Image: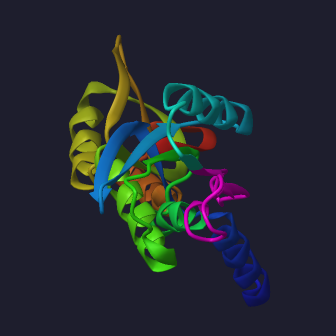
Amino acid sequence: MNKTVKMKQEQVQMENIKEPYKIIERGGMGEIEEKKSRFIANVAPVQNEEEALAFIEAMKKKYWDARHNCHAYVLGEKAQLVRFSDDGEPSGTAGKPILEVLLGLEVRNVVVVVTRYFGGTLLGTGGLVRAYTQATQAGMEACSIRTMRYGTLLQITTDYNGIGKIQYLLGQRKIAIEEPEYTDVVSLKVKLPFEEEESVLKEITEATAGKAQIEKIENLYYME
């Protein structure tokens, strides 16, 4: 193979590798108090902007008597859409700190509403930034966070002599086996990181002397 062609193929392959990101598997709520002001952070997973806006409205109705309901949300695996609001707090003291926590944690498809019940004491710009940051962190700590990794879904078919070898190889890489079917042969599905696809295929082929049939179904993001 021409060296230039090989380098271009490798470059394309590297460009196809998409970075992992985190999602909220289960939302949560966290609360802090600062100089008698209560800051309540509610966090939820969302799939689109409509769901994010609906959650924000629901929190505003739930905490209708609060002074402020500030929010931020991040959508898309590369944070293609971000929005935030100070909801009456001084500019840059609420929505942006909430957003920065989400971006710092690399969490996507998430919305956070931080509700403030005013305690009678002004916190100042720096105090507000710290309070909204800490409240958001508390809310995130109450959530279940998982990693979404870009990879490949494979279907592998083998005889009973090969299944033990395949299970061992996949176990060494901590790759889970899905939907095993045992008939006259063994059929199973696995999701593995995109960058491991080539080496896994080679190992399985060598271990089974080429008897295992491997079908690439699709590339996809999957939850680790």
Task: Give the quadrant of residue 223.
Answer: top left
Give the vertical position of 16 relative to 46 (above or below). below
Residue 72 is one of the magenta-drawn residues: yes
Position of residue 111 in the picture relative to residue 134 (left or right): right
Indicate the quadrant containing the N terminus: top left, top right, bottom left or bottom right. bottom right
How is the structure coloured here?
A: rainbow
Task: Give the total of numbered labels.
Answer: 0
Q: Residue 156, image x and y in percent? A: 45, 34
Q: Does residue 32 appear anywhere in the picture?
A: yes
Q: Residue at x 31, y 39 (%)?
A: 176
Where does residue 80 sit, x and y in percent of width and height? Answer: 73, 58
Q: Is residue 16 magenta?
A: no
From the top left corner, tell me how far across and down residue 37 is, in percent. Answer: 36, 54
Work out whether residue 183 or residue 29 is closer to the camera in this orientation and state it.
29
Q: In the image, which residues are magenta?
A: 71-95
In this view, the residue in front, 46 or 173, is 46
Classify residue 219 as left or right of residue 67.
Answer: right
Q: Tell which of 92 and 214 is nearer to you.
A: 92
User: Residue at 57% across / 26% down in the picture?
Assistant: 61
What is the residue that sits farthest to the top in this orientation?
183
Residue 138 lies, in percent from the top left, at: 31, 54
Give the farthest residue toward the bottom. 3
Identify the residue shown where x is 62% and y is 68%: 90
Residue furthest front in the image: 120
Is there any visible trace of residue 175 in the rendered image?
A: no
194 up-or-down from 186: above or below? below
